[in-house]
Amino acid sequence: MSDEDDRIKSKAARLRRIEHRLYNAPQGVRAIDLARDCGVARRTIYRDLQALEEMGVPVWEDQGRFGIDRAAYLSTVRLNLNETIAIYFAARLLAHHSDEHNPHIVAALDKLAAGLPDHAIAEHIARVADLVRSRPLRADYVVVLETITRAWADQRALRLRYRAPNREAIEREIEPYFVEVSRSGPGAYVIGYDRLRSAIRTFKIERVEWAEALDERFSLPHDFDPYAFLINAWGVMDDTAVDVWLRFSAEAAPRVRESVWHHSQRISEHDDGGCDLYLTIGGIREILPWVLGWGAEVEVLEPAELRAETATHGLRMAALYKLQDTGNGV
């Protein structure tokens, strides 16, 4: 490789590094800091910034600091066939997760389909985009989602009006630490420090009536790791850890064995073909609908609270269907 090739390669790597630094610094970076980071002169950084602009990167400058306009930024990703299939799986899950017409999901899938070399996979991803596009558009939700995700990316505090189920709406100020999606059903959540409660709380974004980003910025606590925070959660809620013991029938056991439901799970076998599933999770609120979904194929042995909740639902269902059958003359 010639010296010229080395120079071009070095510049390309430096441009990628600068682009990455700028994108991940919402408050901007000084040219002198970029120069120190890259080991070059400041005038070289100015030329590199100009080169990035000429390549279409939306670089901004404000009082000596440089950054990237995230709303106008377009990234380039190259994928092989197996990576494309992985993205297709993610797109299908995204379609199941989104129960509304989210124009950003549609736009992302359209761009992904247009940029894939494999025509068959691209067509399927385009069909997923059409599926999401066909759903009702709720413009107020899209605005709220945009506001929350931008505040999260820029580490800015939020003021919002939140309506919990069967409660009056209330104004809250939060510092958004993380955005998560539910694995058990449609729904996106923002996890952050709730100034009203002086504690970290989880808010379902679909329940936010309006939101505005404040000028005030915050720093993420050094001891907050969202993945550690959610380690025991069944979905997105991390309440007090509780041990769960479920006994599955021989008919349901094969379906239980074939999946990893939670990282903490242990399974013990029974001579009759059934099995016991042991879990340690953050509270019972989110797992209750999953347990009820197994019907009479599962018995809750522990904790007592989850057993009682399941039994109460069972009695209510029995009373409901008995009433209906009597009314229908069955």
Image: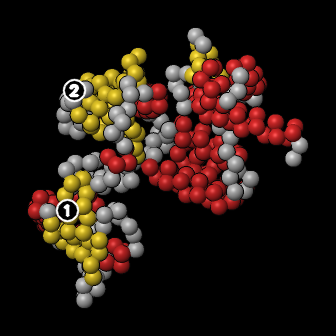
* Residue of label 1: 243
Query: Measured along the vertical axis of the image, is residue 12 above or below residue 304?
Result: above
Query: What's the residue type where badge 2 is placed?
Result: Leu
Query: Which one is in front, 157 or 72?
Result: 157
Give the image quarter of residue 172: top left
Give the image quarter of residue 145: top left
- Residue appearing at x 73%, y 55% in the figure: 119
Whether residue 253 is visible to the viewer of this picture, yes or no, is yes
Q: Number of callouts in the render? A: 2
- Residue appearing at x 31%, y 78% in the figure: 253
Residue positioned most to the top = 63
Query: Which one is in front, 20 or 321?
Result: 20
- Residue 182 coordinates in the image, percent (x, y): 37, 49
- Residue 198 coordinates in the image, percent (x, y): 21, 30
- Residue 321 coordinates in the image, percent (x, y): 17, 64
Lateral position of residue 106 relative to residue 212, left or right: right
- Label 1 CA crowd tier, 10 Å (few <14, some 14–19, many 20+): some
* Residue of label 2: 196
Query: Measured along the vertical axis of the image, is residue 65 above or below residue 294?
Result: above
